[in-house]
Image (spheres, rainbow, N blue to C red):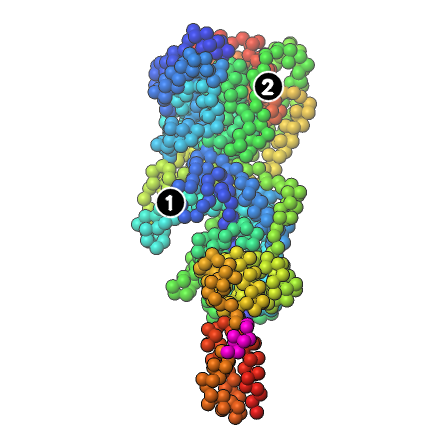
Amino acid sequence: MNYDVVIGLEIHVALLTDSKFLCGCSTAFGAPPNTQCCPVCLGLPGTLPVVNEKAVEYGVKAGLALNCEVHCFSRFDRKNYFYPDLPKAYQITQDTYPLCTNGFLEYYIDDELCKTAITRLHLEEEAGKLIHSSGSIVDSEYSLVDYNRAGIPLIEIVTAPDITSPRQARLFLEQLRLLMRCIGVSDTKMEEGSLRCDANISLKPEGSMVLGTKVEIKNLNSFRALERALEYEVSRQGMVLDRGGKIKQESRTWDERSGKTMPMRSKGDAPDYRYFPDPDLPPLRLDPAWVAQIKDTLPELPLERLHRLERDFGLSRYEATFLVNYPDFGQLFLELAAAGEDNTALVNLLMGDYARLAREHGHLAPQRIAELLTILQEGLITQNRSKAVLEELFRSPLSPREIVREKGWEVLRDSSQLGAVVQEVLAANGDLVARYRAGEEKLWGFFVGQVMRAAEGKADPKLVNELLREVLGKAD
Amino acid sequence: MRKLAHLLQTGEVSSTELVRRCLEQIKKTQPVINAFITVDEEGALAQAAQSDARRARGEALSPWDGIPLAIKDNISTQGLRTTCASRFLRNYTPLYDATVVERVKQAGLPILGKTNLDEFAMGSSTEYSSFGVTRNPHDVERVAGGSSGGSAAAVAAEQAPWSLGTDTGGSIRQPASFCGVVGLKPTYGRVSRYGVVALAPSLDQVGPMARTVEGAAVLFSLIAGTDSRDATSTGASPFQVPVWDPKVVQGLRVGVPEEFFSTGLQPEVEAAVRRSLQVLEEQGAVLQPISLATNQYAIDTYLTLVTAEASSCLARFDGVRYGERVAAEDSNTMFAKSRGAGFGPEVKRRIMLGTYVLSASHYEAYYEQAQRVRTLIKQDVARAFEEVDVIITPTTPSTAFRIGEKRSPLEMYLSDLYTATANLSGICALSLPCGYDSRGLPVGLQIMGNHFREELIFQVAHVVEESVERGAQREL
């Protein structure tokens, strides 16, 4: 049977604040274990949380970028459960009254613009990190706890079940990551856990209005894992349903090695988190003017930029997407384009050898790129030679003009000088000249090549063609 | 307390002498009274020596520099064991000072030690301490009350001139009443809770206990005021000890709620309270019968909220970092067994009740319903304060009961019948001795004032204190 796939995502994004959500400890990644904690984030008896305004600001920013309603009244709740990495045995989160609701994110699947609804976005605190002596808590002899991570601010973003394919899920998450990086609230590194994603997926008979039983998939540590795990679930659930079986409502974990999802716990074992309003924190009341102020600080968002690059700069979707996906390149492009550089030449340069070199060595100063484009346009160097100049720019502090001068790479434009070279080449190949004149036109290329080589690559190809034409005349 | 401050100032007595006298009295009476869990002889003497040195240099930190105090053992003291009278924290030494401890240290008060309480402040008799019961200095066969029984008994037995307690439903006022001392439950938010091991954060407040109204007012002035580490303390204003003025009672509207003088009230208690009311009337106060009808729901509401909040606050005591870890096959069983071994019966009872009222299927019927009733109680109290300036009631239905007398938890809970309303509505309330029953046991009078009206209730208490015939005021 054919099925419709229904996917919803729950994404956790660690916010890039300098200090933690509810205390003043540093959030820097990679410090030695348990060096970035204090009585508050350790949950020592008697300690109290105080909300970091920056975290709220980032949450609001993310909500606005996701087109959400930002609520001027929201509230913190306690989510109670026991786990060794949870210092207070409850997590401070927002359950009943989240910071933001009712937004959406737009992105492209190939050429089709699609939209996924955001149900809610709320603030919460991160737990500590367990380091097991073996693979997992179950088979470990002992486990150690690192509280550096405990209390880092997170936003949880929940989508509506709007996503209809594993690929779309990945594209959504990629766009979300782009958005979060663009507005500067998170570095969203899946490998460091600053972007995490759980997926809910169910199947229903094609066209049916009734949702199937959903399964939650956890432990998705990369974009690839998200797509593969969902693909696996689509086929697993499809096979179960084809056999007339029923899908069990459960949480499953993705196992990278076997490429399969494995059952974790079923609905019956689902914990009761006993949410209730945290009596240590008064409700969060935001001044609408403050929210408006944050809105004003939002940069151009990725999709807006994509459309502007296409519309105002005549770039293709492919080119514009490249510049949006690599905002540093996008920035460079916009800066140089604003300075009057030719858009096509510029984007070709940036997406070509420059991209490879810049990834290795870092970006060049825009003026040096601009100068390179200028001398190319002026015809000071050949297109071919420009690659060598570019390579040199990453190694040398000199300007493009200086490099060209030093290396003697200027195009030979003196027709008498070049004319002599042409004469030499033709003289040395008298038999071939005769064959050409006899009608072997394809030898033209050979002559051009010989002249270029004799001129050590500096010859202006246009001039070479002209001179050859003069001397050889039209082949008849 | 001013007398003591004067003696220190003139050098007629040193802080070291005061501390020694307290330590001697503790040595003599501790074996019977058991007011202390930890006596910090060395620390107190060292702090006293520092105080004396400061005074000698003319650098006293405050007029009260050198007057020692005792602190309830659920208030965190850096480097000084803080047990909450629980096996779980038998060996727990905080890494930081509670804000109130910081403040009394800044005023130069040496800390004699940590006083006994019901485990995690859950109880009304200090019988639930895992360090043994505290006995009432007026009759050692009777309880000192609770949960701040140790702090009350230490002051009554002249082991300390004053002390800090905490009050969630009557835990300062009820033992103050039983032991014949003055105790204040401040307005919610006026004193920082940072560092106070939480029982129920929406109700807990730290307050002073002393042998005189003035002593309590002075200690209150040292601890009151906003704390940036306690988000619920915002708006709290500092407090200054007033100039005592008996004219305050002239024309004062004193509310006398009929519900607090009904069945179950010990006749001698009623008589003593009525006598004080009469004295106030003679001095120009206007007695107004009022109704606080919602008080009949106070205990049920209080218990629902306290158990809910406590079940969450105490979840961190799970054997991972506190208490003795009981080995088990998996982490959940380890949590359960460690908690089973570490908590006493009353704590377990309340955690189970709290877990139940917060569970998804009962949340609405219990927790939410209790919050609604709490709102009604607040409204009822607010209405009353539109008509009257203060409300005067007995602090407890009876004088101190015998150790072991209250067999059922419910009987014990009813000790808070007259006091819980102040916590639920957040207003301030004070208990002071107003006479004795036929057994010579002190009777407590409760004066309730609207939010932030501590100065007024201290003034009224001062008038009552001066007027009521009772045992001579002793101040060491």
Range of magenta residues: A413-420
What secondary structure is marked by label 2? helix
Of the two numbered discs 2 and 1 in the rendering, the one whose residue sits closer to the viewer? 1
Residue furthest left in the image = A141
A227 vs B86, left or right, is right
Q: Amino acid at mark 2?
A: Glu
Residue at the image point whose x is 54% and y is 17% from the top: B217
Q: Quadrant of residue B22?
A: top left
Examine the rendering and report whether any part of residue A199 can be seen. no
Q: Which mark is residue B455?
A: 2
Residue on which the image places disc 1: A32
Which amino acid, mark 1? Pro
Residue A418 among those drawn in magenta: yes
- Where residue B332 appears, x then y in whole percent? 39, 47
- What secondary structure prevails in the magenta region? helix
Q: Is residue A450 above or below residue A85?
A: below
Q: Residues within 10 Å of mark 2 (few under 14, many from 20)?
A: some
| Residue A279 placement (x, y as % from top left) | 54, 37
Could you say which quadrant of the image residue B46 lies in?
top left
